[in-house]
Amino acid sequence: MSDPRKPRDSGSGPPDEPGRGEPCSWCGAPVADDDGFRLVRPGSRATFCRLEHVVPWAMSGAVFDEDDGAPPDLGLGVCAHCGADLAEDAVVLIRHRGPHRIGDGFCGVEHLAAWAKRGGRFRAGA
Ligand SMILES: [Zn+2]
Ligand SMILES: [Zn+2]
């Protein structure tokens, strides 16, 4: 009466650690806290590994995660795309780059996507 199933001794490493990074809302890649983009609006948020992923995400319906936190007040008065005053339902895209947080506000997801399509602030010659 021998048990053919031997306990395996391999796999001593920890399993995939959750919390290493939030998944990108478009492709699911983990996004470290000091990298990528966060999109916030009152009551909801989304995460992106790169700016290019904002565009297909916006095109396919712009599904936000729920979030109780208030959006950060970065002193953004106008839409980075069209220059209109931001309303209560404005969205704020925050680029995380090491310790830096660079925010841009938009009237809505459509203007965010249009801005991202043009290459974001790197193409916006202000
Ligand atoms: Zn992504
Ligand atoms: Zn706008």
Image (cartoon, rainbow, N blue to C red):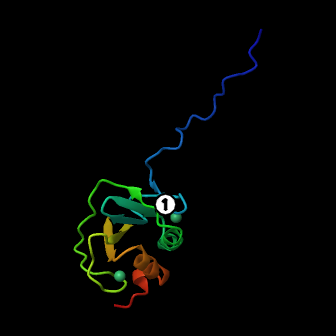
Residue 73: quarter of image? bottom left
- Please, what is the three-letter code of the amino acid marked with disc 1? Cys
Q: Residue at x 48, y 69 (%)?
A: 50
Which residue is tagged 1?
Answer: 24
**Picture quarter with ligand 2:** bottom left
Given residues 71 and 98, the one toward you in this image is 71
Q: Is residue 7 above or below residue 124?
A: above
Q: Residue at x 27, y 81 (%)?
A: 78
Residue at x 54% of width, y 39% of height:
15
Secondary structure at numbered mark 1: loop
Mark yes or no: residue 98 visible.
no
Is the residue 44 above or below the residue 76 in the image? above
Judged left or right of residue 21, residue 6 is right
The reply, left or right, for residue 90 in relation to residue 55 is left
Residue 90 visible in the snapshot: yes
Give the quadrant of the C terminus. bottom left
Task: Report x, y in % for residue 43.
Answer: 32, 58
Report the quarter where the N terminus lies.
Answer: top right
Residue 120, percent from left and from top: 43, 80
Pick whichever, 12 or 40, lies toward us: 40
In the rendered structure, the answer to whether residue 12 lies left or right of residue 74 reads right
How would you rate the neighbour count of disc 1 (Cα within 10 Å): few for under 14, some for 14-19, many for 20 or more?
A: many
Position of residue 39 measured from the top left corner of the image (x, y, whole percent): 38, 66
Front residue (pair 109, 19): 109
Residue 79 horizontal/vertical position (percent): 32, 81
Q: Is residue 102 above or below residue 81?
A: above
Ligand 1 under 8 Å from disc 1 Cβ: yes
Which residue is drawn at the image coordinates 22% and 74% (left, top)? 75
From the viewer's perspective, is 51 left or right of 86?
right
| View extreme (top): residue | 1
